[in-house]
Amino acid sequence: MANHLIYETSPYLLQHAHNPVNWYPWGDEALQKAKDEDKPVLVSIGYAACHWCHVMERESFEDDSTAAIMNEHFINIKIDREERPDIDHIYMDAVQAMTGSGGWPLNVFLTPDKQPFYGGTYFPPQPVVNRPSWKEVLIAVADAFKNKRSEIEQQANSMTEHLQSANSFGINPGADNLQVNIEQADIACANLLKQADKTWGGFGNAPKFPQTFSIQYLLRYYFTEKQRPESLAGQALQQALLSLDKMINGGIYDQAGGGFARYSTDKEWLAPHFEKMLYDNALLVSALSEAYQVTKKEKYKEVIEQTLEFIERELSHANGGFYAALDADSEGVEGKFYVWDYDEVMQLIGNDSKLFAEYYDVTPQGNWEGKNILRVLQPLGEFAKKHDMPAVEIKRLLKDGRKKLLNRRKTRIRPALDDKVILGWNALMNTAYSKVYAATGNDLYKQRAIDNMNFLLSAFSNNDGSLNHVWKNEVAKYPAFLDDYAYLTQALLELQKITGETVWLDQAEKYSKYVVENFSEEQGFFYYTHEMQKDVIVRKKEVYDGATPSGNAVMAQNLYQLGILLNRPDWSKRSAFMVSGISGMMVKYPTSFGVWLIAMLEMIKGTNEIVLMGEYESALKELLSQYLPHAIIMASSSANEQYPLLKNKPVNETLTFYLCRNYACEKPVFSIGELLQSLTD
């Protein structure tokens, strides 16, 4: 018999729709029922690709005796964290404050008025070491709520007060004038390098996440400071590229099918949790595109192309959107879809099997739990030299072998697909496609970005100018969050850059105005939720970068660019105010503030305003292939007085290039070579 989740569209919620637990979705019905019956609320939060969420469901939520306890004593609510990240953020902060750690599944107990008083993550069906069983937790919480109600209420009130006060932690009042300098950029780089793994790349110890924002900051720092002898530019570039190289050679990258898993459980990037998320792949493709512009290293281009082939093959909706994720599990086993037996590989590859197996670390004993995760331990050139074979020949046979493995994989039972379309994650992928077009010049990527953007603006828009957060089955729902608007605006600005079409700039202005009007808070930052949203106990203000960028950081970047593009000094000042306010924390804790650091560095170094007037298409493509991180580019084939950078710039018979700063332009030039020379002078 189905519970109340049967009417939902989220794959994660639907997975629980036939549990014996009487689950409700988050909403007025369940919350009012808790008040009417004076029962505590159990909120259990997870997502479709979460391995331990599935484990706890099998062990506890599908168990009749456990469900009976839950149904008797609690109002039980299931939440897909990707549909309601606002609620997840609030109660994750609460559980981290209570226990010192967090994760998913997230299980938190609330009073009938939504205040948290106890929680944790995964609980086993039987007691293990110092971790109580789920049944023990349920019985103890139910007993405390009944017999120690005043203590529960006091604890819940204290926790809610803590969540309110923690909302402004680390933010200092900014200033109208920018209060950052190159010394802070140097210190941030040094602090990043202190945390860097100089052998395996990345930052910190296992588990290891891609940290693409830190990598992009190091690339920018290298680019702007490489002429300064006392800088750390050389080390910055080395660590950025080492990190990317080790990831793309490791098991976190799907060597057979392309695309990246969410993170590695070990320092060598060998064994991931095998879920593949849209946002990770978008962010890594963006970082790899920049690395390709810096180095022209063909391997980066190949990995970009293979990853986007995976996106098109496995995460693309026919309407133009991108799906959210692929599960880590298939047939109830984590990673089963992706790992290989030695004998299977040898049989599939045939004549070249020994060479293929050696290159990808495939052995009879396996490199992970008796199975093999494909990874590369030796650069192709060294491997070819070792075997006295041309690298191009080895490259060909490896490609043929990967194709055979991918064809075999197609016959396996696939991991579940989370087929909802999330606005913010799609915007991140849209930006990635624009960046790949800029780096490679492949027109197919530009068209894909345009098609996806047209879909997003059509499918997620409301008549009042607002946006929705998630879309599925032709229906969009839940008011969009700050991240959705910030990432979408960023993607629109990238589209303007690569196409020269101001329609995208107009849309970016429109949504930035909407954010300023509906998400602003008194310190100059932005709340995560719209001012009209009333079902959360705290309007959070997210400033840290997590798996995805801080919406505040991205909005600071957006307002900075729009301030120049539209001559909006009020937005420029607000951006400087935000960056100044967070500068102390970003320099001290750079791995949590990479996007802020990127914004800070550009503000310190200044922005090149590049304008192309005339028949610009081929020249713009050539210009975009360069690594120009601190540049705003506008192009027009006719005079346009509406935009400050296009004002008073006549169209000549010959394509004309203008290089400006603060709208003050150097003498125009008439070739890409002259323009690039001006940029380096």
Image (spheres, grey):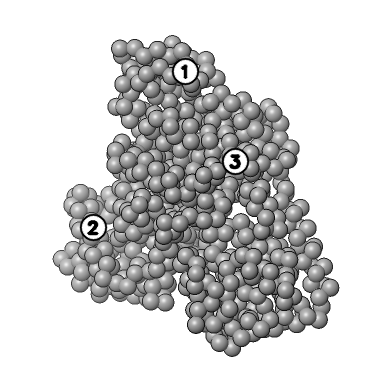
Q: Is residue 477 above or below residue 661?
A: below
x, y percentage for residue 280? 45, 54
User: Image check: 587 left or right of 319?
Assistant: right
Viewer-nearest residue: 467 or 354: 467
Disc 3 marks a residue whose amino acid type is: Val
Disc 1 marks a residue whose amino acid type is: Glu
Viewer-nearest residue: 169 or 234: 169
User: Image check: 100 left or right of 509?
Assistant: right
Q: Are marks 2 and 3 in contact (CB under 8 Å)?
A: no
Label 3 neighbourhood size at 10 Å, few (<14), some (14-19), many (20+)?
many
Q: Report the residue marked by disc 3.
A: 515
Disc 2 marks a residue whose amino acid type is: Leu
**Residue at the extreme front:** 463
**Residue at the extreme left:** 351
* Number of disc labels: 3
Q: Report the residue marked by disc 2.
A: 398
| Residue at disc 2, secondary structure | helix
Mark earlier in primary sequence (1, 3): 3
Residue drawn at point x = 69 percent, y = 63 percent: 94
Q: Is residue 427 above or below residue 139?
A: above
Viewer-nearest residue: 72 or 162: 72
**For the residues marked 1 and 2, what is the alpha-carbon distance in whole angstroms?**
55 Å
x, y percentage for residue 59? 53, 82
x, y percentage for residue 151? 82, 73
| Residue at disc 1, secondary structure | loop
Q: Is residue 153 above or below residue 297?
A: below
Residue drawn at point x = 67 percent, y = 55 percent: 534
User: Image check: 661 left or right of 252?
Assistant: right
Q: Report the residue marked by disc 1.
A: 641
| Residue at disc 3, secondary structure | helix
Residue drawn at point x = 64 percent, y = 44 percent: 519
